[in-house]
Amino acid sequence: MAEVTYLEALRQGLREEMRRDERVFILGEDVGRYGGAFKVTEGFFEEFGEARVIDTPISEAAIVGAAAGAAHLGMRPVAEMQFIDFISCAYDMLTNYVATARYRANLACPLVVRGPCGGYVRGGPFHSQNPEAAFLHTPGLKIVCPATARDAKGLIKAAIRDDDPVLYFEHKYLYRRIKEQLPEDGDLVTPIGRARLALEGTDLSIITYSAMVWKALEAAQVLEKEDGLHAEVLDLRTLLPMDDAAILETVKKTNRVMIVHEDTRTGGVAGEIAARINESAFEWLDAPVLRVTAADTPLPYAPTLEDFVLPQTADIVSVARKLAAY
Amino acid sequence: MTARPAAAGRKAVAGIPAGLGRAQLLELYYFMRLTRSLEERLANLYRQGKVIGGLFRSLGQEADSVGSAFALDRSAGDMLSPLIRNLGSLLVMGALPVDVLRQYMAKATSPTRGRELNVHFGDLERGFIGQISHLGDMLPVMAGITLTFQLRGERRVGLVYVGDGAMSTGAFHEGMNLAAVRRLPLVVVAENNGYSYSTTLERQTAVPQLVLKARAYGVRGERADGNDVLAVYDVTRRAVDRARAGEGVTLIELVTYRRKGHAEHDDQRYVPKDELARWERNDPIDRFVRQLTDSGWADAGELEAADARVAGELDAAVQAAQGEPLPEPASALEGVYVEPPRQAAPWQREVTRG
């Protein structure tokens, strides 16, 4: 076992897949000799050469489109968005071309688009986004959002091996802040479509993903210490396809559910989860499904503003208390 | 360069330009005729209400599709991606007329099983990838196809069609630039047919010739008469050879004309009548027939035989496609992913039960 950061775990996963399968290659902006803006691909250029770690022009649509073309011919491209905010420049390519390829043309499109998402880093409106909701209603895509180092590694490996296109949203706040003991050998793969129980509890359920898993766990500690409440925390890990069985199980167990995400509220992932619970487990609820999310604003830069807009541990605690008292 | 046969070449087969032989000239003629006749059959079916969606014609543009696709080497695994007026290129690559009919009539047996329309279908084995409606998007995709050829060290070439309209999109620019930077084995055929829907070239771009854009991308530019099939073949063939030799991208502007509206419903009221008449006199099939017969490269009997072959094949194809069923409704849910979702949504079960 060795202690690795979330970022190193991601790097290990990528490197192992590139060693395992010569069809895997990386393309993106500054990913080659420079090793990527966050150094995710540091050392790859030296190990795998220019042909497998390709620096591209600043052209997200072309990066994704070229990845799609390569994927049709049996390659396993991993496209990096330097910041995930720029995935919107490839929105057409992803939603119209990539996501529909199998359905309309029986064309395999096994590609991964990955990049750093998320706030709490004073990145301002264009280096902090969480774009998952924009893609959640696009049939044909898969979306994964690792919260732990283990899943950062396990999900990138699963994403690369998946025969369908996968969006892999890595949270930049977690890159170097969380560490975990991971086995040094063996094939660590996290199955896509399966949630993980991050904390067992009996009184209420917090359904969440990505960096908010850590805030939910902090809130659970507070709730236990100050209120004697045992919160369950479900880390979805994959948003598309969603693990309905795991969601249903925690709803039936605690009967009180809240959903926490960092993305803005209106049209967010929480709304979809609440609707599914409503359709499948209405009789099991003792309280309305509540949400903790960012406010409906672009993400501002100043610390006072960003902290006000983004969900904080105290927000989760206060909504959990409301939920428990309902 | 010119592909117009010199008078001296009247008898000698050696006089055929661009290294082509008599059999290939007859093939070019066959594919141009097949394209036109297939669209005429489709127009009949459209008027009978048997075509489900719109019908897009390439009348007057057959030479540019057929001549350019003919320059690829199918046995080498070359690939192309068409646009809506490149039916001819698909037929050259081996697409079956019956499949085109099935596509237009939304049959269960169509290559896309009724999911997509018209010539929006592909066949990796035959070497073509179906377009989507978002113009310019196939440029990045074909950059990825040819990038793969390059990475694997394969001597294969890709060809992608764009129009005067598609060249205004961001995707075109990004794909073109990426292909140019990496010197990918890609031939970009820009069909200048004068109109994108109702918008004229002057409203689409401020440059008088599309080929001028080649310079800005640092790629070779060529311009040819798109209604002269031999000129089209020759200019494309040279670009394909350069691409195969590792010399990178060529942007070819083929000057042609869209003689029908954007789709069959469009009455072209925005088109000056004398302009249409002028281009009718410049019909690419008529021109080629004159070239073939005047030069002695083909005789009337051979051309009639080709026409008869086309008619027979299309009779059979229309006959076959017409009776075929539409897709089963619930088949709409299949094939979004390799593996279906673990749990079907409640409403989805209702559908499959019904």
Image (tube, coloured by chain):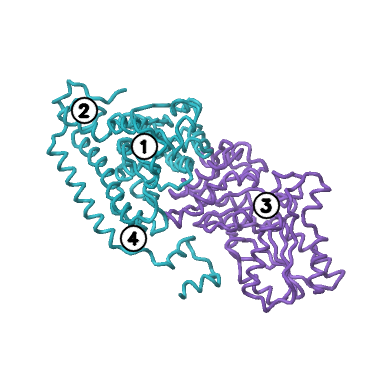
Chain colours: A purple, B cyan
Neighbourhood count class around disc 4 (C-alpha, 10 Å): few under 14, some 14–19, many 20 upward: some
Give the residue pinned by disc 2.
B16
Mark 1 and mark 3 on one chain: no
Identified by mark 3, the residue type is Asn
Relative placement, left or right, of B255 versus A250 is left
Which is nearer the N-term, disc 4 or disc 1? 4
Give the residue pinned by disc 4.
B109
Which is nearer the N-term, disc 1 or disc 2? 2
Between the residue at mark 3 and the residue at mark 2, the CA separation in whole angstroms equals 61 Å
In which quadrant of the rendered view does residue A275 lie?
Answer: bottom right
Q: As displayed, is residue A233 above or below residue A283? A: above
Between the residue at mark 1 and the residue at mark 2, the CA separation in whole angstroms equals 28 Å
Task: Tell me the quarter of the image containing the N terminus of chain B.
Answer: top left
Relative placement, left or right, of B264 versus A299 is left
Name the spot of residue A259 as percent of width and height, x first. 71, 65
Neighbourhood count class around disc 2 (C-alpha, 10 Å): few under 14, some 14–19, many 20 upward: many
Give the residue pinned by disc 1.
B258
Name the spot of residue B176 as percent of width and height, x first. 49, 35
Q: Which mark is residue A130?
A: 3
